[in-house]
Image: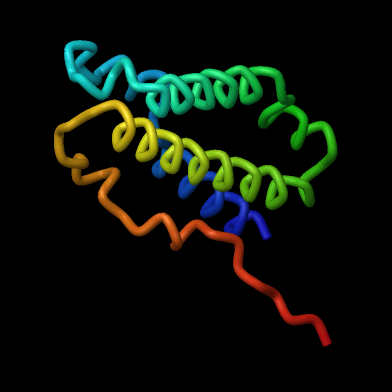
Amino acid sequence: MRIAVIVALSAAVAGCVSSPIDDGASLSQQDPKWTSPQCQQARTAAADYAQREKNHPGWGFGVLLGPYSMGMVAAVKEHEQQQRRLLARQMHLECSSQPLPKELDFDPATYAPKKTHYP
């Protein structure tokens, strides 16, 4: 059990994705797309997501619930990383005329919710 927790924690830490707000700050404000309404919506969505992330309990909450909750906390963190990548990709597409960087060049359908079939 401990090995699984250590593997989950190390995978979560190794796969950290920067905040979409940070990615947006690296984009050129001189780009013609920067002032478009779609870009403003993407920047607002990224800022709202960053604020929501700051307000949730985080890793400490999982420690308080006990060792069995660490898997749940790791799943939440993985979902947050996926959301950050999707927001950063969307912001780049809406706010920049430059091609997507390698870390954002992926199929967004890979993060779409999978349909589960229950018996």
Quadrant for the N terminus, please: bottom right
Residue 9 is situated, as x and y percent measured from the top left of the image, at 54, 45
Horizontal relation, residue 4 to residue 7: left or right: right
Can residue 83 be seen here? The reply is yes
Residue 76 is situated, as x and y percent measured from the top left of the image, at 65, 44
Residue 108 is situated, as x and y percent measured from the top left of the image, at 41, 55
Point 84% across, 38% down: residue: 65
Residue 12, compared with residue 64, is above or below; it is below
Point 38% across, 25% down: residue: 39
Quarter holding residue 110? bottom left
Q: Nearer the viewer, residue 58 or 64?
A: 58
Point 42% across, 37% down: residue: 16
Horizontal relation, residue 51 to residue 19: left or right: right
Quarter holding residue 25? top left
Point 49% across, 46% down: residue: 82
The residue lying furthest to the bottom in this view is 119
Can residue 19 be seen here? The reply is no
Residue 38 is situated, as x and y percent measured from the top left of the image, at 41, 28
Residue 22, compared with residue 73, is above or below; it is above
